[in-house]
């Protein structure tokens, strides 16, 4: 397979203004008739007079041009395209093809999910439905006619507004949809099924009425309230914060059980993985409720950032994804606790994006090449892309940023544009030069900031010398300095913020946070007028996606943890301390844990003035994989041992306090999803976890009672996880009970699989292999695969990286079995092994051998080929 390069981008030679599609739907054999209005693109250079349309896995039946039937002498067909050999400057084209949804296990194009038919076209799935210019810069208006058996498929949906509906002979019916907004083919969607809808309404800021419908299988109707509430909140928020109104008469969401990703923003018809729609307190955890709110908002926000304004080509993916993630993060921050949201977003960035940036598949936010675009829906494009937008928002300030986004929406509505067009709007609205800032889009790698502090008590100055260095990444051996906003504060001995006046500034600055702008490899900032040596609070609120190196003493970290006015940095100081302690324990398991650590932990635990959700974040140990990322060579077993040991010590030393916190934060009434209530649950279950680590006999009883009595899935799952990890009869019995109760609820059953797959118990791999043969397991359902195989390989480091290589062999076997069925999911799973160079020699050898075994397969998909080959480069 060959890469596609950004530098080769050419505008399309032809444009398509209008598409009329007619589907005769049948799971085994669907007929698709497409009528395209094609014209030469005046802005493109003339080619050889032919037109090449994308098309894959289509059985071509008929082609006609301007109503004249073409013969095979007029065109050429191969596995990826239909080429019309001579075409006029403007013409009508009709093609009729057959496709086979029930055989489509890749879940791209038109496929069967349970009893319904649905589509997934992003990125390049439309070409599996009909012949087309399947690229995002070809935007057309779509009319879609759906014909199907009325009993089997009473609901027929597509993009836009419904304009016709009638019965046909032989029990069939016809529904016609018209989407007035030009869109790229990746936003096309259709749904056919026996579905029920929860309906509601929304009046936009300008007074237009919009019908809201969430379609689900009838037995799920009682799990849509939270999704509907989230949708209405998102619609209001986008009006208030970004001035964006919804534009069609109806907005529809459909929940499907077989879906490769989280959800898809098709115009007016968002298709969702049901995991991000369905929730009832007894079936979904707080994390699920939060995920639903965020993903519903994300897809809705795409209506403007993605649909009205789309990407010129797939290298610009972050134009819509980075911006939309930024928007959904801001939305969630406004709906819940801003501080906790930021912590979780940064945790995610550090856990996934930083390793990606340091690994063999590192790529810029705007990649320069790809073999398979599906491999580039990454943490870099999404999460780092959002950080890049956030930095611009912070550099501009709220008012200018709003002017800049208004300009972007006005200037580019209806267009397919680039990340550079976006930055140009930021520049135009603010008058700032973002020339150097643009490097965030085209240089990969995480910058490392090394900061050194010098003070001269005599003249009251304090100097920070800041060096930035970005390690090389594949294809980019040398990096230029980034433009980095660095928010800092200086704390006095009483914990208050001091003024941050620089030596060359004429007037005093108010105490608090100030933003330094870094542009060079090394820069020095000299602060004056400081009566005492301050403790610096660096990277407040995490203003840029960078790694910080500063030689804090333990005492300084304890001080920041207790006093920093920036909540994010209080959390970060605690995490740095915990990380330090854990890494010291890895190096020497006999090392003593200082009393002051327990004292600080206890103080935080009993701090009733703080938000409990934030406390739970502060008191959670850094994950084993994150600790591994901080080591030169990952010591899997050492980390697991240190983690368990510290958890046990905390449980033992603070047993009484933990028990009190556990009991004081019990549920008092019916489940509500509010930041306060979910914070209580998080803190309570964290306390229970430490007690269970310590083997506290009272905690085992509490855990069993919680498992038996809780009415909400958050508490049930927390107890189940602890019981399973505890093992023995208690664990087995809880699993059996859970299965008996929930085996018919697919999303809950996923939890049953993943709680077993992520247990650190020594026999977990054997159990996982056994579960692969369970009658409820299927490789054809991505959620199930993720809940068992994905959870084991990505969230159970100590068992996946077992020294005997069993985990690696298991993953490679799964990838090989899955690749012919669903290459997207297979290649995503394979990514669990690409950081093999970070491990010891024996594990490196084992992982490399498994990747090589995969690469040796001749019919390997482009998806898996790209990941495997880059991993070994
Ligand atoms: N824009 C959507 C991406 C997506 C996707 C991409 C490739 C293959 C399947 C897919 N399903 C959804 C989701 C989003 O970011 O909003
Ligand atoms: Zn998105």
Image: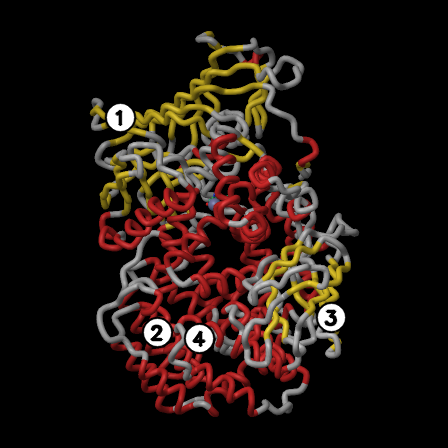
Coloration mode? secondary structure
Q: Earlier in the sequence, mark 3 or mark 1?
A: 1
Nearer the observer, disc 1 or disc 4?
4
Q: Secondary structure at mark 4?
A: helix
Q: How busy is the neighbourhood of tag 2: few (under 14 within 10 Å), some, or many (20 plus)? A: many
Q: How busy is the neighbourhood of tag 3: few (under 14 within 10 Å), some, or many (20 plus)? A: some
Residue at numbered disc 1: 174
How many angstroms separate mark 3 from mark 4 (CA)?
30 Å
Marks 3/4 in contact by CB < 8 Å: the verdict is: no
Q: Earlier in the sequence, mark 1 or mark 4?
A: 1
Q: Is residue 797 visible?
A: yes
459 displayed left or right of 789 = right
Q: Nearer the viewer, residue 92 or 542?
A: 542
How many angstroms separate mark 1 from mark 4 (CA)?
56 Å
Q: Earlier in the sequence, mark 1 or mark 2?
A: 1
How many angstroms separate mark 2 from mark 3 (CA)?
40 Å
Question: Residue 172, image x and y in percent?
Answer: 24, 27
Residue at numbered disc 2: 680
Q: Is residue 816 visible?
A: no
Q: How busy is the neighbourhood of tag 4: few (under 14 within 10 Å), some, or many (20 plus)? A: many
Q: Is residue 336 above or below residue 533?
A: above
Residue at numbered disc 3: 452
Residue at numbered disc 4: 615
Q: Earlier in the sequence, mark 3 or mark 4?
A: 3
Nearer the observer, disc 3 or disc 4?
3
């Amino acid at each position: 397979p060959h890469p596609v390069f950004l530098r080769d981008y050419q505008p399309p030679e032809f444009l398509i203004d209008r598409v009329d599609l007619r589907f005769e739907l049948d799971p085994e054999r669907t007929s698709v008739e497409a009528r395209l209005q094609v014209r030469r693109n005046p802005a493109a250079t003339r080619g050889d007079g032919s037109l090449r349309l994308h098309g894959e896995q289509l059985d071509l039946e008929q082609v006609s041009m301007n109503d004249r039937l073409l013969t095979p002498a007029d065109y050429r067909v191969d596995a990826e395209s239909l080429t019309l050999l001579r075409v006029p400057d403007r013409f009508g084209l009709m093609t009729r093809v057959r496709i086979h949804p029930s055989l489509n296990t890749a879940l791209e194009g038109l496929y069967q999910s349970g009893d319904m038919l649905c589509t997934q076209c992003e990125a390049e799935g439309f070409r599996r439905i009909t012949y087309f210019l399947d690229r995002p810069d070809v935007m057309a208006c779509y009319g879609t006619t759906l014909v199907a058996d009325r009993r089997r498929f009473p609901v027929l949906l597509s993009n836009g507004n419904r304009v016709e509906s009638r019965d046909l002979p032989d029990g069939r019916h016809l529904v016609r949809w018209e989407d007035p907004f030009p869109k790229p083919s990746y936003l096309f969607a259709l749904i056919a099924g026996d579905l029920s809808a929860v309906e509601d309404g929304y009046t936009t800021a300008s007074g237009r009425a919009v019908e809201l419908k969430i379609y689900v299988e009838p037995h799920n109707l009682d799990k849509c309230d939270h999704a509907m509430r989230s949708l209405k909140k998102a619609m209001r928020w986008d009006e208030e914060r970004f001035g964006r109104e919804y534009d069609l008469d109806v907005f529809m969401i459909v929940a499907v059980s077989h879906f490769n990703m989280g959800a898809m923003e098709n115009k007016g018809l968002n298709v969702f993985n049901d995991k991000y729609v369905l929730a009832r307190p007894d079936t979904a955890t707080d994390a699920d409720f939060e995920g639903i709110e965020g993903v519903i908002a994300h897809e809705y926000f795409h209506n403007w950032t993605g649909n009205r304004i789309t990407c010129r080509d797939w290298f610009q993916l972050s134009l819509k994804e980075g911006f939309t993630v930024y928007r959904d993060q801001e939305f969630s921050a406004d709906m819940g606790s801003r501080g906790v949201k930021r912590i979780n977003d940064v945790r995610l960035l550090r856990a996934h994006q930083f390793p990606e940036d340091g690994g063999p598949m590192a790529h810029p936010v705007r990649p320069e090449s790809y073999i398979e675009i599906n491999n580039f829906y990454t943490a870099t494009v999404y999460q780092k892309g959002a950080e890049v937008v956030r930095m611009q928002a912070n550099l501009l300030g709220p008012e200018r940023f709003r002017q800049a986004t208004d300009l972007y929406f006005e200037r580019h509505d209806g267009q397919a544009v680039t990340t550079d067009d976006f930055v140009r709007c930021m520049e135009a609205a603010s008058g700032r030069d973002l020339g150097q800032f643009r490097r965030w889009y085209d240089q990969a790698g995480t910058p490392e900031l090394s900061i050194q502090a010098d003070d001269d008590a005599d003249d009251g100055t304090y100097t920070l010398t800041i060096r930035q260095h970005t390690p090389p990444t594949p294809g980019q051996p040398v990096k230029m300095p980034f433009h980095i906003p660095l928010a800092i504060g200086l704390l006095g001995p009483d914990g208050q913020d001091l003024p941050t006046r620089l030596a060359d500034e004429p007037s005093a600055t108010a105490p608090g946070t100030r933003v330094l702008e870094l542009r060079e490899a090394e820069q020095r900032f000299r602060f004056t007028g400081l009566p005492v040596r301050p403790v610096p609070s660096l990277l407040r609120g995490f203003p840029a996606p960078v790694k910080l190196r500063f030689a804090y003493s333990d005492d300084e970290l304890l001080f920041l943890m207790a006093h920093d006015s920036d909540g994010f940095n209080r959390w970060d100081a605690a995490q740095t301390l915990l990380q330090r302690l854990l890494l010291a324990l890895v190096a020497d398991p006999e090392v003593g844990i200082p009393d002051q650590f327990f004292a600080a932990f206890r103080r935080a635990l009993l701090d009733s003035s703080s938000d409990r959700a934030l406390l739970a974040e502060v008191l959670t140990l850094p994950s084993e994989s994150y600790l591994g990322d901080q080591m030169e060579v990952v010591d899997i077993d050492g980390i697991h041992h240190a983690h368990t040991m510290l958890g046990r010590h905390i449980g033992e030393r603070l047993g009484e306090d933990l028990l009190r916190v556990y009991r004081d934060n019990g549920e008092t009434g019916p489940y509500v999803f509010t930041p306060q209530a979910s914070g209580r649950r998080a803190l309570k279950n964290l306390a229970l976890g430490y007690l269970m680590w310590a083997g506290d006999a009272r905690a085992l009883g509490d855990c069993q009672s919680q498992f038996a009595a809780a009415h909400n899935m958050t508490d049930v799952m927390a107890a189940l996880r602890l019981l399973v990890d505890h093992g023995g009869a208690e664990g087995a019995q809880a699993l059996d009970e859970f299965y008996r109760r929930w085996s018919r609820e697919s999303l809950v059953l996923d939890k049953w699989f993943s709680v077993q797959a992520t247990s650190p118990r020594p026999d977990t791999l054997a159990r996982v292999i056994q579960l692969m043969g369970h009658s409820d397991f299927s490789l054809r359902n991505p959620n199930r695969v993720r809940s068992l195989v994905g959870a084991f390989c990505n969230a159970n480091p100590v068992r996946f990286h077992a020294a005997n290589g069993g985990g690696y062999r298991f993953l490679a076997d799964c990838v090989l079995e899955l690749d012919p069925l669903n290459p997207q999911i297979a290649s995503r799973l394979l990514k669990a092994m690409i950081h093999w160079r970070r491990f010891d020699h024996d594990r490196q050898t084992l992982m490399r051998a498994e990747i090589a075994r995969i690469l040796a397969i001749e019919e390997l998909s482009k998806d898996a080929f790209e990941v495997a080959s880059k991993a070994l480069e």
